[in-house]
Image (cartoon, rainbow, N blue to C red):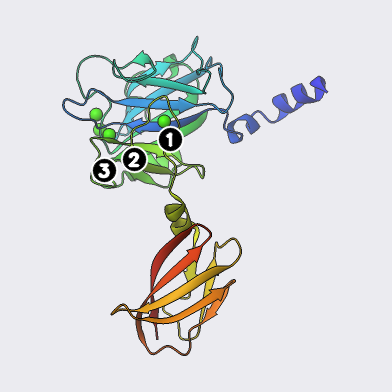
Amino acid sequence: MKKYLQFFMVIFPSLYVFSQSLVINEVNSNSPGADTAEFVELYSPSPNFNLDGYVLVLFNGVDDASYASYDLDGYSTNSSGYFIIGDTGVTGVSLNFPASPDSFLQNGADAIALYQANKSDFPNDTAVTKTNLVDAIVYGNNDVDDTGLLTGLGETTQYNEDEANDSQNHSLQRQADGSFKAGTATPNDNNLVLSIEEALSKSLKIYPNPTANMLYFKGLDGKAWVSIYSITGQRVMRQEIFKSLDVSALTEGVYILEISHKETAIRKKVLKR
Ligand SMILES: [Ca+2]
Ligand SMILES: [Ca+2]
Ligand SMILES: [Ca+2]
Ligand SMILES: [Ca+2]
């Protein structure tokens, strides 16, 4: 059995990347006052995960090249799976950013990347690379997308720490699907999770919109109740649905759909032609 495992580790080392034994879990680049509560939180599903062989690299969007790197040899995640690199005083911090300048972790558009490599592979001003890349995040605070960073790190989304106009208190936090969401910072602790409403709103697809006859619902787990309101707030239809709803009887116009599903209800706008 053990031999088979060793065989797989030699033949498919990249499996260990896909299984995501270590990820960038949270980034707080912008914090109150002089920006002295910045941090990067790493997370390993296995507690006390050995960080030998990893290096965390900070990239500047101005030239898409590195401005700092942290060799993680000799460190490990804690019993909850967290490891914090950040300003002095951040909960659970193990490795400190330099005391000066205050805002050491740049606010964007910038990037943070985790590699299976050494600090010597990333002297300052090393260009972004996907070689030996384990995980990366491109982020900003209302900055225009930096395509150089996105392309250079194989990412498709630049996340906005100021998504809810509160980047001072908010950080970017990894969700179960691998995306990041802004919310009150949680260093050394579980990330915020999407509320049931937010999760349903994100997963539910209603199409076609506009429609003349049928509406189809994708992302519902079982049945739901749908109430349809006119733009003036009058309920014009209420029906239990499974995957579709016939709306051909409605007159043309804009309607608000209220979808009640399990413990929650969300509203979506649709146009009837
Ligand atoms: Ca922040
Ligand atoms: Ca920058
Ligand atoms: Ca900063
Ligand atoms: Ca966290």
Q: Secondary structure at mark 3?
A: loop
Cα–Cα span, label 1 and label 3: 17 Å
- Residue at the disc numbered 3: 162
Q: Residue 59: percent from the left, percent from the top?
A: 33, 29
Respond yes or no on whether mark 1 lies under 8 Å from ligand 4.
Answer: yes
Q: Are marks 1 and 3 in contact (CB under 8 Å)?
A: no
Q: Is residue 98 left or right of residue 252?
A: left
Q: Is residue 91 above or below residue 175?
A: above
In the picture of the structure, the residue carrying the numbered disc 1 is 191
The residue mark sitting in front, 1 or 3, is 1
What amino acid is at disc 1? Asn
**Could you tell me which secondary element the residue under label 1 belongs to?**
loop
At label 3, the amino acid type is: Asp
Task: Give the residue pinned by disc 2.
Answer: 183
Marks 1 & 2, CB-CB < 8 Å contact = yes
Q: Quadrant of residue 126?
A: top left
Q: Nearer the viewer, residue 173 or 160?
A: 173
- The reply, left or right, for residue 215 in relation to residue 2 is left
| Amino acid on which the number 2 mark rests in the picture | Gly
User: Is 123 on the left or on the right of 105, as rendered?
Assistant: right
The secondary structure type at the circle numbered 2 is strand
